[in-house]
Each structure stands twice: as structure tokens, then as C-alpha cells.
Image: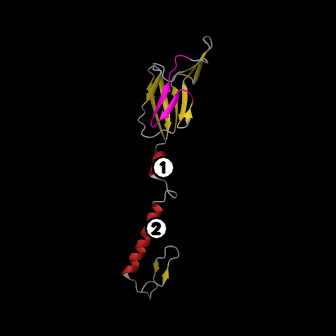
Amino acid sequence: MSSTKKTKIMRLNQWLATDIPQMADFNTDNYHIEESFCAHVSDEHAHTSKKEKKKWDAPCFCGSYMGNGASERTVETQCGFDVSFGLVFATSMPPSAVDFSNKIKRGFFGFFSKMGGNSGVSVSGENFTVTNSSSSSNGEYLSLNQSGIIYNYVLFR
């Protein structure tokens, strides 16, 4: 005889002293427990996914490169993830510097995302491309790869 009572939610057996447990009762209970457990642990709305946990464990990556003077350069970061947002800046320079006597401005800072960024820097996967301009129509030069300058970058997942 099966149990006289059942639990409210999972309908598991609850025997009274007068009940006689059957093997099928235990097997049915185990089946219900396993089904509920598996449904719960695989529910990504109730739990964080492996991808989300990885993002929290290492949300950013930092690195640097030495400018080589090329007008355009792709920086291979080896960060191991597709970059969502990033910053790049010269270590020993301000974000921008103005040479008033020559009426030019040099930009030593850039930001970028998958949706775009400031002029002179863009992202593709785990790498980003910077520009170093030698001429300008408005007096502003992008200096994100000047020869001999060390640049730092911070990349976010």
C-alpha cells in the first residue's frame, strides 16, 4: 500500500505507522526529487551561468604596449575575451596636450566599445586598433601610437 499522505509540493510519500511502504513508492519519490533538482540547477534565470561567473571572476584585463610610430596599429591583447569596453592612455602624458605656438592639440587618451568610441580607436574581439595621425584638418592629432611612448590599456568584458 502506498502512503496515506503526500507532501504538498512534490507529492512525496509520507507514511503513517499503519502504511506499508512499497519499492515503487521510493522509486517514484526519487524520480520526483531528481526531476525537481535538475530543473532547478539548470534554470539560468534562478542561477548565474558559467559565462556570468567567469565575467565576475575576471571582469577586466590590463596591459601595455610601446608605441611604434605606425599610423595605424592593432594591439593584440591576449585577454581571452571579447572586449565590451576599453580605455587606452599614454603613461607619461596627459590625456591631451596643446602646443599653442604651433596651434595643435595631441590626444593621448582613447576609449572604445562594441558600439563605437572616440576617433582613433576601435575594438574587434579581444584586440583593439589605435591611430597615430601625422596631419590634421582641425589642428587635433591623434597620438595613440607615438614612437617611444608607453601606453596602458584597461579592457572590460
Range of residues picked out in magenta: 118-135
Residue 129 vertical placement versus 97 (above, below):
below
Residue 137 at x, y percent in the picture: 59, 17
Q: Quadrant of the N terminus?
A: bottom left
Residue 5 vertical placement versus 126 (above, below):
below
Residue sitting at the far front:
137
- Secondary structure under tag 2 reads helix
Which of the pair 18/33 is nearer the observer?
Answer: 33
Residue 72 at x, y percent in the picture: 47, 24
Dot 1 corresponds to which residue?
Answer: 52
Circle 2: is it few (<14), some (14-19), or many (20+) Cα within 10 Å? few
Dot 2 corresponds to which residue?
Answer: 36
On screen, residue 68 versus residue 96, left or right, reads: left
Q: CA distance from mark 1 to mark 2?
A: 23 Å
Query: Please, what is the three-letter code of the amino acid marked with disc 1?
Result: Glu
Query: Please, what is the three-letter code of the amino acid marked with disc 2?
Result: Ser
- Secondary structure under tag 1 reads helix
Residue 58 vertical placement versus 33 (above, below):
above
